[in-house]
Amino acid sequence: MTNDERRAFVLEHTRLSPVPLVPEIAIRRADAVTPVWFELARWLDDDVVDVPFWCVPWAGGQALARYVLDHPDVVRGKRVLDFACGGGLVAIAAARAGATVWAVDIDPMAAVTTSLNAAANGVELEVTTRNVVGESLPDVALVLAGDVWYEPAPSAAFRRWFRRLAAPVITADSGRPYAPRRIRELARYEVPTPFELEARTTRTARVSMFER
């Protein structure tokens, strides 16, 4: 599978549109996740393919992007890691706010989508497909992690890793079951969400500093 093929898939199954809570940023979005998930599984001939997190702006990511744009001093002039970047919304917000941004996701579809979205918004990002969990990241001044708390084992691994990092971690979640409890809330937003995605039209999302 080539990146050109991945770009063609993303372009076919998404459209560029403003993000509800962050309308100054437009990203490539699907109208519904399930049809894209089905088409991706068929295209890859893989019945257990992961959810295409890259094709919609999740509530936690929207909240974190909004916070970064509203508080640019948090990231300005820093080298920032957008961990599990998905479609790159948070990374784009950080770049808009003056950061040098490294966007990372283990899914090559996410990396391709992030690059497309960065170009559409006129920002430059370093985009990497790599599992950085466990690395010390000595050149990173701040980690941003929106909506990563979905499953128990990965969430536990993320918590252990974040506690070891020298860089502070700002995370966001919208009531996910495995979000850490040791956090200091920085902001809270009511985020518009597709009913198909969340079984509700809004979710409360909180932006928090991860406490070690």
Image: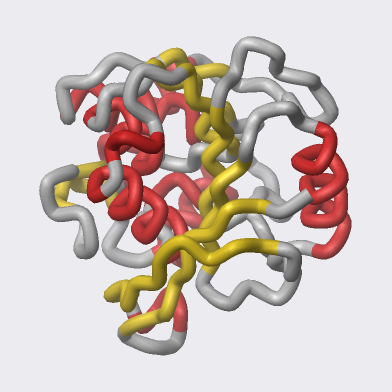
Confirm whether residue 200 shows in the render: yes
Place of residue 150 in the rendered image (x, y in percent of width and height, measured from the top left): 68, 64
Residue at the (74%, 70%) spot, across then down: 181
Is 97 placed left or right of 42 in the picture?
A: left
Q: How is the image coloured?
A: secondary structure
Going 39% across and 31% down the picture, which residue do you hit?
Answer: 75
* Image position of 212 with respect to 119: above or below: below
Front-most of 152 and 140?
140
Query: In the rendering, at what x and y percent does residue 90 appear?
Result: 39, 41
Question: Residue 160 appears in which quarter of the rendering?
Answer: top right
**In the image, farthest residue toward the bottom:** 200
User: From the viewer's perspective, is 132 left or right of 139?
Assistant: right
Residue at the image position 55 percent from the left and 47 percent from the top: 170
Image coordinates of residue 184 in percent, x first then y, are 60, 63
Q: Is residue 201 above or below residue 209?
A: below
Q: Can the viewer see residue 8 in this picture?
A: no
**Up-down relation of residue 19 to residue 132 (above or below):** below
Residue 29: x, y in percent?
A: 28, 51
**Count of all numbered marks drawn on residues in the image:** 0
Q: Is residue 156 left or right of residue 141?
A: right
Using the rendered view, name the quadrant where residue 196 is placed: bottom left
Residue at 76 percent of width and 41 percent of height: 162
- Quarter of the rendering occupied by the N terminus: top right
